[in-house]
Amino acid sequence: MSGRPETLFPLFADIKTLDGVGPRTAENLAQLGVTTPRDLLFTLPYSGIDRQLRATLQGADLPDVVTVEVTVGEHRPPRSKGGAYRIVVQDAQIAFQVVFFRGNAEYHQKLLPTGQRRIVSGKAELFDGVPQMVHPDHVVRVDEAETLPQFEPVYPLTAGVTQKLMARAAADAQIRAPDLAEWIDPAQKKARNWPGWRAAIMSAHAPASPADLAVNAPARERLAYDEMMAHQLTLGLARMARRRVRAQPCVGDGTLRTNVLAALPYRATGAQTRAVGEIAADMAQPARMNRLLQGDVGSGKTLVAFMALLIAVESGGQGVMMAPTEILARQHLEGLQPLAESAGVVLELLTGRDKGGERRAKLAALAAGDIQILVGTHAVFQKDVEFHDLRLAIVDEQHRFGVRQRLELGQKGPGAHVLVMTATPIPRSLSLAQYGDMDVSVLDEKPPGRKPIKTALLSNERMSEVVDHLRRAIADGRQAYWVCPLVEESEVVDLTAAQARFEHLRAVLGEGVVGLVHGQMPPAEKDAAMARFVTGQTAVLVATTVIEVGVDVPNATIMVIERAESFGLAQLHQLRGRVGRGDAASTCLLLYQPPLGATGLRRLTTLRETEDGFRISEVDLEMRGAGDLIGTAQSGLPQFQVADLERQSALMQVAQSDARTLLAADPALTSDRGQAARTLLWLMRRDESIRLISVG
């Protein structure tokens, strides 16, 4: 099947072929993202108006939309130009006025002729104690009552498009909706009580009550599932295409790993052991591993990463671990060095700082295979860097590792396995939507011995107490972070906030005790200030959020976050994770500016009550929505028209498992259900994924 199936042609016709849509309206609809009849079918009503006929306005809770049968009384034209035209009408119990601010007497007489009965429907409200209905939405003859919808759908609008026009065009689009072969597993469709695709479209556009607008109404749930299924099929096809890239199976004998585990002062957690097992199983395959290692702050990703690198070394190859900055690369090196020594493995660091003879010597050792594990920044991509036999590349996700880097990496080791690490816990529904083409390992246990961090909320009116607390901690040889907010996204203001706090603390705590880092500093200065803090020359580091990522100072036991209410939950959690890395008890002080709003309060109390990053990310998702949580523009999150990622996360898991089951049984989508799934991909504009379907 090379192109879009013919049955879908009417849905992808020009939008101007629909009833009531001319060139001007077509331009306006494009603002809603509607350019074809298909788009209109997926633009569902978001609410509805109850237009059931009632006997009288008497006792109605006004203002409200009401529909009543009335006898038309006298017409009262306006006394002056531009005044209101009033018509007195009488329902079964009371009289009220129907009011118009435009039109002429002739038109109004025709619409509501005195002495006759009509049904009027519109918003009624009290004006000086008298009920009135201004510009009714509908006026119909009694014998035409059935033309009035009992429950009228309300569509999203844009400038220049009215409800009536939307309803007319949507009705015309529905006439073109074809009967499509079913791509949903029959048993599942029956269990969920889902209608067929065409019936679901019809039903979703004709809700009979508010219940039909709910995300779990059968028609809507089915259409949401279809979107998710198309997305997961696309990810599954991409995953299969990537698996067709051959890789060298890496099977180690386990000796190096055993030595490292024996030398550890603690036992690996169950989650770490499980993750290493999943990675080892992937690396043993002749297809390239593409796994995401997701772990909360302090869940022990370093050990898992090192075990994976040892599998590469045990099987006779090399491994590389990449970090986004030099400071983090050095930190990885320091974390891995003792493990490498216990395994007897050669570990080296390569950054942009390596120059001249030293660099040449490292490159020669790497090309000869004498360096078994390399830790580095993106400097490892430079032309002259050659590996003897690269088997595994580990990427710290903070580099936003793009497609281009993946290709460059592919050139360094054509069959190298890839492991991506992220320290940002993402709710399961989003990780399925964003990383659904990857296999995911989750570290959801903290290694033994990690002390809980005490978190407290303080009004910034108690600033002087916080400073006294710092003074005592410094006297005890402790260190602290003081994070200043990014004010109004303006780097200049942000700078002054951090600068002013730095000067204030330096004045009270003494010269040389306080350091400063912010986004506007030249990188070398920033590195130097960080280095002074890491080595303990400065006791307090005033910073903007640049420290959120990865800095590890075990002696730092206090984290002060100023204007904490202005940060996102995930960010606060990441910042707090900078302390609690040593043996001493740690505290995180959240300073807020009173009065604290409801959202700010919920965010800060959630943080105070739990250190579980996954729980925190779920609350963050509920509060902010999927797009904001990872910034939709760069998130790689699909844009769904019907599906709601926050409220239908379980459905995304069902779609993923269904898509994988279908592709495992029918990778080329040639069965009847496979062919129907191809139609679904075309319907959902997944033309790219159709090119990925394996031939034979």
Image (tube, rainbow, N blue to C red):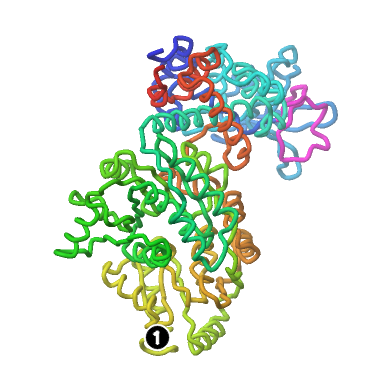
Up-down relation of residue 389 to residue 509 (above or below): above
Q: Quadrant of residue 44?
A: top right
- Asked if residue 10 can be seen in this view, the reply is yes
What's the amino acid at mark 1? Val
Q: Position of residue 520 (x, y in %)?
A: 31, 67
- Residue sticking out furthest to the top: 6
Q: Where is residue 362 in the image (x, y as percent from the top left)?
A: 22, 60
Up-down relation of residue 665 to residue 317 (above or below): above
Q: Which residue is drawn at the image coordinates 83% and 37% (left, top)?
A: 59
Which type of secondary structure does the marked residue at label 1 adopt?
loop
- Residue sticking out furthest to the right: 93
Q: Residues within 10 Å of mark 1 (few under 14, many from 20)?
A: some
- Magenta stretch: give its range: 50-74
Of 519 and 414, which appears nearest the observer?
414
Up-down relation of residue 197 to residue 490 (above or below): above
Q: Mark 1 points at which residue?
A: 513
Q: Which residue is drawn at the image coordinates 76% and 18% (left, top)?
A: 117
Residue 410 appears left or right of 263: left
Image quarter hosting the N terminus: top left
- Asked if residue 487 can be seen in this view, the reply is no
Is residue 56 part of the magenta span, yes or no?
yes
Is residue 636 part of the magenta span, yes or no?
no
Q: Quadrant of residue 532?
A: bottom left
